[in-house]
Image (cartoon, rainbow, N blue to C red):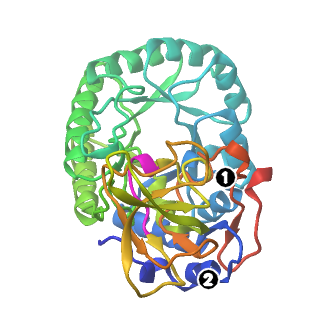
Amino acid sequence: MSPLTAADLGAPLAAALAAATEDRLVYDLAGIERRHDTLRNELPGVHVRFAMKACPVDEVLAALAGRGAGADAASPGEVEQALRAGVPAGRVHYGNTVKSDRNIAEAHRLGVRTFATDSLQDVAALAVHAPGARVFCRVATGGAGALWGLSNKFGCPPGDAVRVLVAARDAGLVPAGLSVHVGSQQMTSEAWHGAVDDLGDVLRALGRHGIRVDHVNLGGGLPALGYRDRHGAPLDPPLDKIFAVIREGMDELRRIHGGHLDFVVEPGRHLVADHGAIRAHVVRLTERRAADGERQHWLYLSCGKFNGLYEMDALQYRLVFPGHPDGPCVPAVVAGPTCDSDDAYSHEEGLVPVPAALASGDPVWVLSCGAYATSYTTRGFNGFAPLPYAFAGRPERTGADD
């Protein structure tokens, strides 16, 4: 699959952006549902647990729940939101290995019965505050090939995973599964090869201890398609190959296990990123001299790192200027509106071509920002409020009250 262009937005999302006269984040719920269904077709029989942190919006959760998806929650607050949005408690797991005694007890009270773990200390706490719960142990990965490797804070080596699940069994918990996460926006299929090898080793070792898990959680990492890298080159993940490798890995793990084995995935950005876009506007296109004497253009937008585009330090979002389809362009550093120097793309990594005739107030569409645009935003840094959000073909919602 190739990176998105403006034409790939789809008519409902493009129409909603064109109709907007004020800044807002627009989601295409039908597009999110289609991406979910495509994922299920590519990985038959897999259970989807949406990584809520990517887009904690009730309507998105409800739409995915209506397609049969569950939720990967990382706090009691996320558990409560998932239940409120219509996700059955049986399809919610607590996927965060970092949790206090109070968090464990509250999630258990809310009906969660499946918890991630990666340490003996966490197992001991689960035995006290979620007695009899099902646990799955996260096996650490290196994260190579991903934009965000996620390799340090979570997970344990394969040998430790065996000890953790043995301890869980001995503490009266159910050693139900294993999990991995190959890193967010994983750009290679090789990452899943390595993860399957490690999982296979753990399954064999668990068998020698008389433990047979019932599922493997392959985590998140499935990429979005519409990003550019920090230098402005389109990111083109080999999604078809990734799916093929995952299917082969599932077959291999079933063979090693020697019986029925369920599979879970925790997609986040893969489901929502390309089906959300921001209608923003130009604050100013300026030209000024840098310290080395070189003249530079700077394009200041009404949204940036602190109100919708938090990940701009790791990637570039595709920009569309609907009022300027033609005409000369100039290379510019793109920055947000705040009085903070971190609120900008690094001009050392890549300038963005923008129409030379841009004027303050001109609309700009920021594509493929449906993931993390709401969850990472501040509550009003420098007085710039969070973006309201709306849905293609539906009334507007205001994110500030959520």
Q: Secondary structure at mark 2?
A: helix
Name the foreground residue: 317 vs 112. Answer: 317
How far across and how far down the image is residue 12, in percent?
59, 82
Span colored in magenta: 312-318
Q: Nearer the viewer, mark 2 or mark 1?
A: 2
Q: Relative to 194, is 352 on the left or the right?
A: right
Q: Residue at x 24, y 40 (%)?
A: 144
Q: Residue at x 67, y 67 (%)?
A: 23
Amino acid type indicated by mark 1: Val
Q: Is residue 31 above or below residue 400?
A: below
How far across and how far down the image is residue 53, in percent?
57, 45
The quadrant of the image that shows the N terminus is: bottom left
Name the foreground residue: 106 vs 220. Answer: 220
Question: From this viewpoint, is residue 62 visible?
Answer: yes
Question: From this viewpoint, is residue 380 visible?
Answer: no
Q: Secondary structure at mark 1?
A: loop
Residue 298 falls within the magenta-colored stretch: no
Name the foreground residue: 264 vs 382. Answer: 382
Amino acid type indicated by mark 2: Ala
**Residue 278's image quarter?**
bottom right
Residue annotated with mark 1: 87
**Residue 376's image quarter?**
top right
Residue annotated with mark 2: 18
**Residue 204's image quarter?**
top left
